[in-house]
Image (spheres, rainbow, N blue to C red):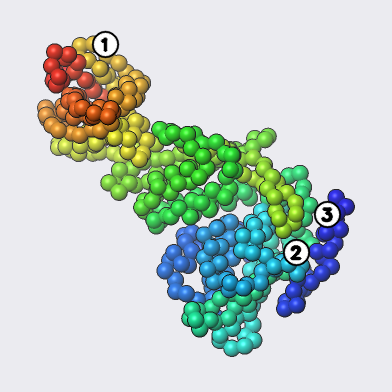
Amino acid sequence: MCRLFLLFLLFLSTSASDFFDFDWDSPYESTEDVRYLGRDDGRTPSERGEPHPSTQAQMNERFKEDMLAVLQKRSRAHFDDLARYFNPNIQIQSCFASGKNLNADQLYQLMIHLSAYYRVWSNVEFENRDLAGPKYAFVIMRHNATIHDGSQIAGKWKYEASFKRLWNYFLIDHLTFVGSCRGIPQTAPQDPLEDPDHFVERVRTKLVSDLFLPYGYSKKLENFEDFGDWITEAAQFVVCDEPKMNKKEFIKFMADRYHGIRRYSDNVFNYTKNQQDIEITFSTTWEAPNTTLYRDTYTFRVKKEEDYVPQLDNSFSYWRIYWVTKKCTVDRTRHPAILDGANNLMEVNKRFCGMIDGENWDVFQSFLDLFDPKDTKWGACVGARDLGYDKIREHMEKVAMRYAKCVVTQVNIRNLIRAEFATTFTMSRATDIQEQEEVDVGFSGFKDKDGYWRMNRMYFLCDETTQKRKFIEL
C-alpha cells in the first residue's frame, strides 16, 4: 500500500509532456444529464461510408463520435475506427503515467477503466483552437461525469492532428488525457467502481440500441466482439441444439447466426439482482431471409471479476458476464388458414428436413412449434399406441442421428382445407456409404380460433414387408 500511495503522489506531482499544459479542472454546473451522447445506430463513421477526414471539421466530428462511443459504450469498433487515423509516431499520454507514451492497446484499456468509473455524462464541450490554419487541428474535449457515489468530476482530453499530403487526410499526432486523475481511484477497492445498475444499463443499450435494432444493418464479427469484451474468458455457454463452445466460438456463433438479418422486433430486457450476481434476460424476434420469424432468448449471469490494468500497475474489480444460456428458438411465424393450405404444407416439409440437415436455427423446436401441444397425437407406426406432443422431440432426435440428408421427393395432398397430406422423404443414411431410404409420413392440421394453421397429427408407417413405407389413412 505504501508503494502504491507513493506512486499515486508521483502521478499527481509531475507533468505529462512538454507539449501539453496540464491543468486541473473542477466540475462545472451541469445543465443537462445524459447517459449516452453518441449516435444510436451503433455504426462507426467508416461503416456508414463517411469519407476520410480531409478537413478540420471532419476530423473533429470523427474524434467526438468515436471517443464518446468508447468511453460511454466500450465500443472497440469505434476505437479501431479512430485508431486508423493515428500517426505511426503518435504520442499518447495520460495523467496516470506522466511522461510515458502509451500504445493503442494501453490507451483502450485506460478508456475502458474510465468508462467503468463514469456513470452519467453532462456538459460535453469541444473547443477548437485555430492555431496554424486549416491544415492543423487542436481540440480540447471537456465533460462532467457523475460517479458511483453521486458526485461529479471533470474530464479533459486534448488532441492535435495535421493534414498529411501523402494520404490526403488528417492524422492524429498527439492525444492526451489530462484530468482529473485526482478523482479516479488508483488502488483497487473491494467492489467494482461501476454501479451494477449502470453496467446493466450499458448491456441493455448494447443489445437493444446497437446489435438488435428494429431496422438494423448487416452486423460484422467485430460488432459482437465488442459485446464479448464484457464476457470472461472462462465463461460457460449453454446453447440449445448446439455443441459445447468457448467464448470465441460463441461470439462467432452469434455473428454467423445474425449476419444479414436486417429486421428485429419485440426486444424485451429484464434483470434481477441477487446477493452474489446479476441475472439478465434478453429476448428478440428476428426475421430470417425466407421471412420466417424466430424468437431467441438469452440469459446472462454477471458477477465481479478482477482485471489487471497495466497503466496503474494494479488489479481492479469489474462486472463481467460469466454464464450464458440460450433457450431453444421459438418459431413465431403464423400461417393464415386460407382455403389453400399449400404454404403450411411446404413449411412442415421444410422443417422436417431441417431436423435431418441440421440447419442454423434450433431445428427441433422449430418443427415442434407447428404443432398444438394440447391436442397432438402421433405414432411411429400406424395402429400402434398414440403418443403425445412431449415425445416428438425424443423420436426425431433418433431419426436425425440415423440420417444425414433429407429431400422431399413426393407429396400426396388429401385435403388442403384441413392441411391433410402425406410426404415421401428420401433419406441418406449417416454412414460412409450413405445408402438411401424412403420414409412416408402423414400429417394433418386444423384452423385454430385465431384463423391460423396448427398441426396435430403425424404418423410414420412401419410396413416392414416393403422398403418403401406407404401412407395409411389417419
How many angstroms separate mark 1 from mark 2 (CA)?
77 Å
Q: Which mark is residue 4?
A: 3
Q: Label for residue 97?
A: 2
Instruction: Give the x, y percent position of residue 397.
Output: 34, 25
User: The residue under label 3 is which amino acid type?
Assistant: Leu
The amino acid pointed to by label 1 is Arg
Tell me what residue is drawn at x 28 percent, y 27 percent: 431
Quadrant assignment for the C terminus:
top left
The amino acid sitting under disc 2 is Ala
Categorize mark 3 by other alpha carbons within 10 Å: few (<14), some (14-19), many (20+).
Answer: some
Nearer to us in this view, 72 or 249? 249
Mark 2 or mark 3: name the one nearer the start of the chain: 3
Measure how far apart labels 3 and 1 are at the Cα level. Answer: 75 Å
Which corner quadrant of the image does residue 439 belong to?
top left
> Which residue, given by chain and number where applicable, does mark 1 sit on?
385
Q: Nearer the viewer, residue 144 or 321?
A: 321
Q: Which residue is situated farthest in the right direction here?
A: 2
